[in-house]
Amino acid sequence: MASAGTGLLIPVQGIDRSKLQDTFTDARSEGRVHDAIDILAPAGTPVLAVADGTVEKLFDSERGGLTVYQFEPGGTYCYYYAHLERYADGLAEKQSIKRGQVIGYVGSTGNADPAAPHLHFEIHRLGPEKQWWKGEALNPYPVLHGDQPLQ
């Protein structure tokens, strides 16, 4: 398993950090920017928890498809995994998960191109209210690539 200098794992099994591309802030439809990086991989490739934590929410959304929201133990960061083909068997909200645990599988659900399955991965710094939708988006690329610590 590839790991970044911060202790965060690359969240797609078999992907080396040298293969990551910085797609953070790329333009998207409706004037949106991309608050994530996309990690291309064959459909069905295991998606791994980047760190220990808790599954805060499992959600099927129009844009993100099958998603996982993970809070790290200190409650400072939320990790968001989207476009999953399916969840790992038995994955449930409020479940404790460990770094490297399979939580789902790469897919193209939501608004993802079916011809380009990938994991959409975000990191958010949570505010005092601990609501992921109000968190500050951080660029995952330099953290996962090992260029800067998560701070």
Image (cartoon, helix red, strand yellow):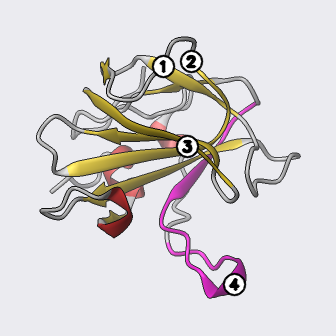
Which residue is the extreme one toward the bottom?
31
Q: Which residues are magenta?
A: 25-42
Between the residue at mark 3 and the residue at mark 2, the CA separation in whole angstroms equals 14 Å
Between the residue at mark 4 and the residue at mark 2, the CA separation in whole angstroms equals 32 Å
Between the residue at mark 3 and the residue at mark 1, the CA separation in whole angstroms equals 12 Å
Write down the quadrant of residue 98 in the picture: top left
Circles 3 and 2 in contact, beta carbons < 8 Å = no
User: Which residue is identified by label 2?
Assistant: 88
* Comes first in the chain, label 3 or label 1: 3
Between the residue at mark 2 and the residue at mark 1, the CA separation in whole angstroms equals 6 Å
User: In front of the other: label 2 or label 1?
Assistant: 1
| Location of residue 75 in the rendering, given as x and y in whole percent from the top left corner | 16, 45
Residue at disc 3, secondary structure: strand
Circles 2 and 1 in contact, beta carbons < 8 Å = yes
User: Which residue is identified by label 4?
Assistant: 30
Q: Amino acid at mark 2?
A: Ala
